[in-house]
Amino acid sequence: MKTLIRPLGAAAVAFALLAGGTATAQAYNLSGGHLPTTSPSYKINGGSSASRTAWSAGVSDWNNAGAGVSPSTTSGSATVALSEANDSSVSWDGITYWNNGANGVMTNVSAQLNAAYTAGYSASKREGVAAHEVGHTLGLAHSNSCVLMNPTTPDRTNCGVYRPQQDDINGVRAIYGASSRAAAQPGTVMHLSQAESFKDLKSLHRSADAVVVASVGGQSSTVKDGIPFTDHNLKVRAWLKGGSSTGSATVHQTGGPVDGALMQDDRDPLLQEGQTGIYFLRQYAPGKFFIIGGADGRFEITAGNSVSALASSNVKDVSGSLSDLVSRTQGLTRAEGSR
Ligand SMILES: [Zn+2]
């Protein structure tokens, strides 16, 4: 009997390993840094009661997740500073930024909820943004699919994800359970959570106040609360939607130099002077715009007049020739005007 059962047992174990291996396949991405402690403290600085409640819930969610870390809130000195912005000139509803030391230890770790968007969210949706940002403060980078570290709030909401999922937890376990760590790339890091996500040209067009074909001119940067912002002067060749008689527009983007180092979102890097593109814009003040959906609302015009989306874009139906995209966009504008 023993000799019969043994091979069956071995096969069952092999099958279990195989199944387990599939279920725990890594999808998480790591920023490369880590906090100096597995019991980090978080201080909530000011803000509305809605934001404060969301931050508390986001920290608790991670404390209860079984991820091998015990974050807690404090009113004293803290590892991480949490606060609230109220900025309608940006596309993000949450932001986290810090400095990576050469030893991989994260310092000056800060995160903000942007009440310009989150004040209109349900409590659980707001908690989801907060828990997502706390995930960044622990060292997680963005991941696609239905996980907390998905970079867009609409995608997390569509998935019903407002708290750490198994994959997010595995990522934090991998950071703090590691016996040795590769040295992180020193420098500043910034992650933006996008308040909107666009899958196709039609939804992008519908949400845009203006669409332009333009080249990027000069820029100027400022830093507010440790976050850099850059205003680009766009030379507009054609307004495909909305528009104005002027041939220029200012595009406001999050990112820029801080203390001599460039801080930008890896999925939505700064526009470069001299670059040309098609940009889907929201107007937040006369003549002043931001690109909607971060990476989603921008397309580069490359050699031979072809257009391409950024690698991190969610828009799946734009590629090919400039003239084709221009005529499709103008067609959508005409259809909108005749409604
Ligand atoms: Zn994020």
Image (cartoon, rainbow, N blue to C red):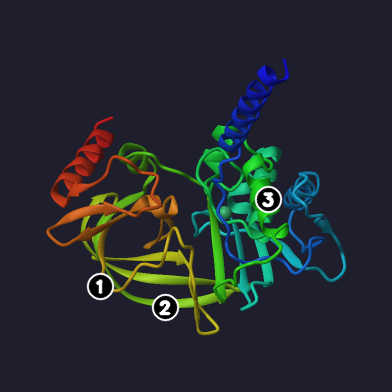
Q: Position of residue 236 (x, y in %)?
A: 24, 63
Residue 74 shows in this picture = yes
SS at badge 2 = strand
For badge 1, the amino acid type reads Gly
Q: Amino acid at mark 3?
A: Ala
Could you tell me which residue is drawn at 69 percent across and 38 percent down? 124
Q: Specify which label sits upstream in the sequence, 3 or 2.
A: 3
- Quarter holding ligand 1: bottom right
Label 2 CB less than 8 angstroms from ligand 1: no
Q: In this view of the protein, which residue sits in the foreground, 284 or 256? A: 256
Label 1 packing within 10 angstroms: few (<14), some (14-19), many (20+): few
166 vs 141: above or below: above
Mark seen at residue 220: 2
Front-most of 165 and 283? Answer: 165
Q: Quadrant of the C terminus?
A: top left
Amino acid carrying mark 2 in the image: Ser
Residue identified by numbered label 3: 130
Rendering coords of residue 251 (x, y %)? 38, 64
Label 3 CB-ligand 1 distance < 8 A? no
What whole-number distance in Å separates the C-alpha atoms at marks 2 and 1?
15 Å
Q: Secondary structure at mark 1?
A: loop
Does 77 appear above or below 20? below
Q: Position of residue 294 (x, y in %)?
A: 43, 54
The answer to whether marks 3 and 2 mark residues whose Cβ atoms lie closer than 8 Å is no
Q: Position of residue 303 (x, y in %)?
A: 15, 62
Q: Which disc is residue 274 wearing?
A: 1
Q: Quadrant of the N terminus?
A: top right
For marks 1 and 3, give the CA distance. 37 Å
Name the foreground residue: 282 vs 113.
113
Q: Nearer the viewer, mark 2 or mark 1?
A: 1
- Residue at far bottom of view: 260
Quarter of image, res 25: top right
